[in-house]
Amino acid sequence: MGEERFRNKVTWFSFGFSLLVIWVHSYNAELYLGKTPKMAVVYRLEHCLGDGIAQIAVPGFFMISGYLFYRDFTWKKLGEKWQRRIGSVLVPYILWNFLYYLGYVIGSRLPWMTHVVGKGVIPFDLFTAVDAVINYTYNYVFWYLFQLILLIVLAPVLYPLLCHWWSRLCLFAFLWWMVATGNNLILVNADAVIYYATAAALAIGKKSWVEKALPDNMKRRGYLLGGLGMIGMAALIYHIGLRTAFVPCFVLCRLLGVAGLWMGVPGENLPVAGELMSHNFFLYGIHFAFVRFINKAGIWVFPATPAVPLLLYLFMPVLILGIGLILGRALRRWMPVTWGLLNGGR
């Protein structure tokens, strides 16, 4: 596919993963129903979606990021790629973490918000602020960006390993062994490296597999069947993982799920991504705060029946999408510089 179609497909997938990740953080059964039999039913329904399909979201982000970083990579471009990621990853990471910290500081001091915040009075001092920014203390979902920043910094180590088949083989054998044995690398999660490095390896050596143009319907049907086959295999491996509690099964099923989805959705058939889809980073940034607020505030508004938490859970991506659209347009109109920083220049 051409450059324009490729970028359009990346935008569609990033947007889709941004919606899926909302379900991962929207569990609310126990909050509304307590530890009751009714809660158990709603809990199972929510986790069926949140722990199943939606779990491909963050691996998908890692794979898109890894592929884009190493696409057309050369040593001469390393400084340029690092510089671009300062604006698209590092600055938003710092800014969002600081805003979440300020939000908790203010919310913990407002009588009508104390219960929603649920963390007591948050100290307002330099040490706590620095800790919040570096360690995403009050913005838990940004663990992904913390990992991504480390992976970007590790480019001089990863690139030489990914350039040769034998070093790739050794790297992935080591990473899968780390996952299987429950060990971890220093600061970086082994499974995060697997997702990121797998896509990076494809960008370096098998770019045509990922960006292959499919001009005729026969080839598109073949890729669709191949993608469905991968997704089916991912589902099978997931159920094996549930029975055996073998962690590599979950890593592999998510890897195959993202790959199968990418393979099964031809970029030639996707409509041009709309303005809203360029808000995916902003959507990722705001969703955690609003999910928590909606779920906790809803206790005071809605009756504690099983339908309430389940419907809130199912429609949470739509609610957050609406909030993100309103806030995003307001920021773009009235505070364009702030908008650019919060959305990583996208």
Image: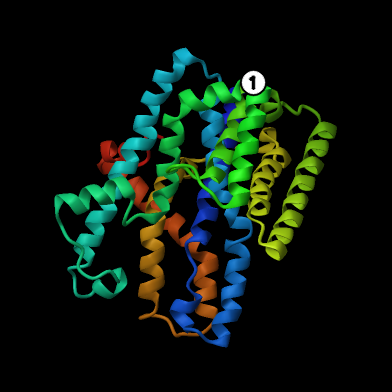
Side (left or right) of 13 relative to 292: right
**Relative to residue 51, is residue 126 depicted above or below?**
above
**Relative to residue 95, is residue 204 depicted above or below?**
above
Q: Quadrant of the C terminus?
A: top left
Secondary structure found at label 1: loop
Residue type, mark 1 in image:
His
Q: Position of residue 292 (x, y in %)?
A: 38, 66
Side (left or right) of 285 relative to 200: left
* Viewer-nearest residue: 91 or 192: 192
Is any atom of residue 223 visible in this view? yes
Q: Quadrant of the N terminus?
A: top right
Q: Position of residue 127 (x, y in %)?
A: 18, 50
* Number of residues whose C-alpha sits closer than 10 Å to that of mark 1, classed few (under 14), some (14–19) or many (20 or more): few
Q: Position of residue 113 (x, y in %)?
A: 25, 71
Mark 1, residue position: 164
**Relative to residue 35, is residue 160 depicted above or below?**
above
Q: Position of residue 267 (x, y in %)?
A: 66, 34
In this view, the residue farthest toward the top is 76
